[in-house]
Image (cartoon, helix red, strand yellow):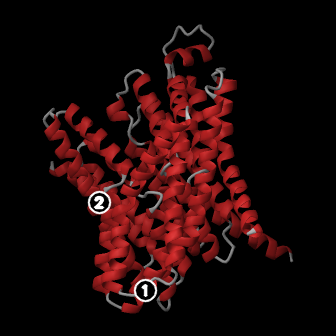
């Protein structure tokens, strides 16, 4: 890729990002000036911050589009292609492909779910906030890894669901029941944050990769339609982090109690 | 300057660490599982460099701009003491950030194709465009409503789990009545609403509100706005599916 094309791409993405955040900026600055009518504490610093956010996001998107998204999307198609599945089963498939022939797909789903969640800027933001509000009792990395494990489990199970063609709502309702039970036992201070962590997993990095995987599966598995069965991966990726974050906090409080008993 | 430079390189290193798992996963599947060469190593390295730089700038920008600004807004509203203005603001913020969300636009277009293919709407561009726009408006309304409810919850100090469990019941009941084609779209629409810029702003707003109101704990009361924003669209979209 030559420099001119790269710069052009950067420019269009920056303009696109500015357009995307314009409504948000209009609302917050509009209310700041017209309703609250209070000067901003440090306008130069705030402005620099907003410029950094927009520029950072644009660089981030261009870089992903250049380095990771194309190869990740092609990979999702190749891994779900029937030829690859047949080969994995050793060329001698006389029976139809079964759900357990998709082992690499489930592993890829989990690995990509974990890794893309770790790189998700919105999650980093919430983790920084949670760590500072909790006075450090919730660690940035602890929370991010807990959410990423949840996303990995969710996306892997989501692929299994597309392969088997089982109805989406059974999984979601079962997930709700687990969450409600966990809510009864989890430490109170984690509950709101855990519910939030569902929504922050699926953003800039995760959605394109996971959508490509869902689409690849739904179009290559016999009997599935990409239009109907391609949906649902994002819902899974949103649901499971709630469980793992509450689990992480429950584990923390159990360990704490055990430590206290020892002393 | 020297110290600033050092802290900048420190953040670059931690951004590189954030990205490392994704690079390793893709490299492993490309080389070990699919056994294919890595295409265009040069442009890949440039891309990775941009991602790391971008993430570093974004995080710095959060600390300088979005977080303090979001908190200042929350303090401002708490001081003003007008619930009506807070409600208007919360709705406007939720609606405005969602209607322009690129991920939602993509999902809405896909959903329109599903609806056309299954005969819910006419199979022409006009009908599909109307359907997609209707869906986006529905989701934006839902998020506006969610931020309003979330802000009122922080003011009143209602425990979050009652509201969330109530929302879950709403989702389950609506699933029983909604047409089957809309269910997948509805469930996914919850996840695509919260963008990378909205999330930090809304988090700062919630924490700021909770810490400026006496008797509220920023940890138990400040979070939860994003949770509502990913729950209400599911219910609203299923209602939209029933109504179409």
The residue positioned 58% from the left and 37% from the top of the image is A67
Q: How many marks?
A: 2
Q: Nearer the viewer, residue B127 or B120?
A: B127
- Res B32 quadrant in image: top right
Residue B150 in view, yes or no = yes
- Res B171 quadrant in image: bottom left
- Secondary structure found at label 2: helix
Q: Position of residue B45 (x, y in %)?
A: 65, 37
The residue positioned 52% from the left and 27% from the top of the image is A74
**Which residue matches tag 2?**
B140
**Which residue matches tag 1?**
A39
Host chain of mark 2: B
The residue most toward the front is A4
Q: Is residue A186 left or right of residue A34?
A: right
Host chain of mark 1: A
Where the N terminus of chain B falls, by quadrant? bottom right
| Of labels 2 and 1, the one closer to you | 1
Q: Position of residue A253 (x, y in %)?
A: 69, 70
For label 1, count other residues whose C-alpha is less than 10 Å away and answer few (under 14), some (14-19) or many (20+): few
Residue A147 in view, yes or no = no
When the figure is inspected, residue A2 is found, relative to residue A238, above or below; the finding is: above
Q: Position of residue B116 (x, y in %)?
A: 20, 34
């Amino acid at each position: 890729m030559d420099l001119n094309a790269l710069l052009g791409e950067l420019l269009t993405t920056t303009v696109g990002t500015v357009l995307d955040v314009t409504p948000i900026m209009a609302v917050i600055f509009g209310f700041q000036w017209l309703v609250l009518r209070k000067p901003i504490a440090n306008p130069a610093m705030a402005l620099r911050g907003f410029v950094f956010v927009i520029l950072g996001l644009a660089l981030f998107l261009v870089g992903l589009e250049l380095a990771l998204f194309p190869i990740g999307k092609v990979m999702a198609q190749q891994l779900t292609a029937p030829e690859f599945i047949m080969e994995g089963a050793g060329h001698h498939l006389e029976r139809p492909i079964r759900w357990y022939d998709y082992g690499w797909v489930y592993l890829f789903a989990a690995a990509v779910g974990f890794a893309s969640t770790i790189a998700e800027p919105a999650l980093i933001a919430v983790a920084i906030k949670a760590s500072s509000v909790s006075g450090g009792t919730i660690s940035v990395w602890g929370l991010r890894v807990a959410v990423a494990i949840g996303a990995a489990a969710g996306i892997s199970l989501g692929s299994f669901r597309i392969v088997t063609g089982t109805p989406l709502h059974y999984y979601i309702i079962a997930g709700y029941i687990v969450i409600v039970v966990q809510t009864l036992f989890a430490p109170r201070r984690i509950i709101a944050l855990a519910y939030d962590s569902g929504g922050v997993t699926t953003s800039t990095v995760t959605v394109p990769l996971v959508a490509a995987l869902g689409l690849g599966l739904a179009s290559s598995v016999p009997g599935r339609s990409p239009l109907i069965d391609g949906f649902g991966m994002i819902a899974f990726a949103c649901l499971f982090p709630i469980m793992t974050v509450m689990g992480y906090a429950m584990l923390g409080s159990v360990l704490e109690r055990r430590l206290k008993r020892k002393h | 300057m020297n110290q600033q430079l050092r802290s900048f390189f420190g953040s670059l290193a931690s951004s590189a660490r954030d990205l490392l798992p994704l690079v390793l996963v893709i490299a492993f599947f490309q080389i070990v599982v699919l056994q294919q060469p890595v295409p265009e190593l040069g442009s890949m390295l440039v891309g990775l460099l941009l991602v790391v730089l971008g993430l570093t700038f974004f995080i710095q920008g959060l600390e300088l701009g979005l977080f303090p600004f979001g908190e200042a807004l929350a303090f401002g509203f708490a001081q003003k003491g007008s619930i009506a203005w807070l409600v208007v603001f919360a709705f406007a913020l939720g609606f405005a950030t969602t209607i322009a969300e690129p991920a939602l636009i993509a999902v809405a277009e896909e959903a329109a194709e599903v609806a056309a293919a299954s005969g819910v709407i006419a199979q022409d561009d006009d009908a599909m465009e109307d359907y997609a726009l209707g869906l986006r408006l529905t989701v934006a309304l839902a998020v506006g409503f969610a931020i309003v409810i979330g802000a009122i919850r922080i003011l009143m100090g209602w425990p979050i789990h009652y509201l969330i469990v109530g929302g879950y019941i709403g989702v389950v009941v609506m699933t029983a009545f909604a047409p089957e084609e809309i269910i997948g779209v509805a469930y996914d629409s919850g996840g695509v609403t919260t963008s990378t810029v909205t999330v930090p702003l809304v988090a700062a707003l919630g924490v700021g509100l909770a810490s400026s109101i006496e008797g509220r704990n920023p940890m138990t009361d400040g979070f939860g706005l994003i949770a509502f924003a990913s729950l209400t669209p599911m219910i609203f979209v299923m209602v939209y599916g029933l109504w179409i």
